């Protein structure tokens, strides 16, 4: 009985170690899609506390994508300035508390930018829209 218990504990520890190592290596992917009306160009500039991803110009329905490894303490955040015509807004395009599950369930955090705010698309076909940062 003790040997069986010991083997189960050993297997459990091995599974936990493999999960932890997978998390260290896994990357999160973010895709930003221009869904503005009337073929408007979207200008974006995204960055985190550590990385500046530069300026990008997206034509209608085109996208910008980036990947990164979230830090192990769960504080990773990327924010973007998005502008078109005379409008300009900031949005936290990745916050670990809100988007951390992208790594496991969605594989890519996919955002559709609209005039009212970005909408996050889920793998089941639904979406949730968020207001711009104030």
Image (spheres, helix red, strand yellow):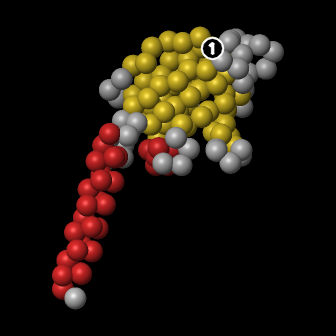
Nearest to the observer: residue 6 or residue 49 = 6
Total residue callouts: 1
For the point 28% across and 48% down, the residue is: 21
For the point 22% across and 88% down, the residue is: 1
Drawn side of residue 69 relative to residue 81, left or right? left
For the point 79% across and 20% down, the residue is: 37
Asked if residue 79 shows in the view, the reply is yes
Nearest to the observer: residue 114 or residue 20 = 20
Image spot of residue 13 (x, y percent)? 24, 64
Q: Quadrant of residue 52?
A: top left
Q: Residues within 10 Å of mark 1 (few under 14, many from 20)?
A: some
The secondary structure type at the circle numbered 1 is: strand
Name above or below for residue 45 compared with residue 133. above
Split into 4 quadrants, where in the image is the C terminus? top right
Image spot of residue 26 (x, y percent)? 38, 40
Image spot of residue 11 (x, y percent)? 27, 67
For the point 47% across and 25% down, the residue is: 66
Nearest to the observer: residue 110 or residue 23 = 23
Q: Quadrant of residue 116?
A: top right
Asked if residue 92 shows in the view, the reply is no
Residue projecting furthest to the right: 38
Drawn side of residue 17 relative to residue 123, left or right? left
Name above or below for residue 17 compared with residue 130. below
Q: Quadrant of residue 89?
A: top right
Instruction: Find disc 1 in the rendering and name its residue.
Output: 58
Name above or below for residue 43 compared with residue 113. above
Image spot of residue 125 (x, y percent)? 71, 44
Drawn side of residue 79 relative to residue 25, left or right? right
């Amino acid at each position: 009985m003790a040997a069986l218990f010991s083997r189960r504990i050993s297997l459990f520890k091995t599974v936990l170690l493999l999960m932890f190592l997978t998390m260290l290596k896994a990357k999160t992917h973010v895709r930003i899609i221009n869904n503005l009306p009337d073929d408007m160009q979207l200008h974006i500039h995204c960055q985190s506390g550590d990385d500046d991803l530069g300026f990008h110009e997206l034509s209608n329905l085109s996208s910008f994508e980036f990947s990164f490894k979230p830090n192990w303490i769960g504080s990773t955040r990327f924010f973007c300035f998005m502008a078109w015509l005379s409008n300009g807004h900031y949005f936290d395009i990745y916050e670990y508390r809100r988007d951390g599950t992208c790594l496991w369930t969605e594989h890519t955090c996919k955002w559709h930018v609209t005039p009212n705010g970005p909408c996050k698309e889920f793998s089941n076909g639904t979406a949730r829209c968020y207001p711009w940062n104030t």
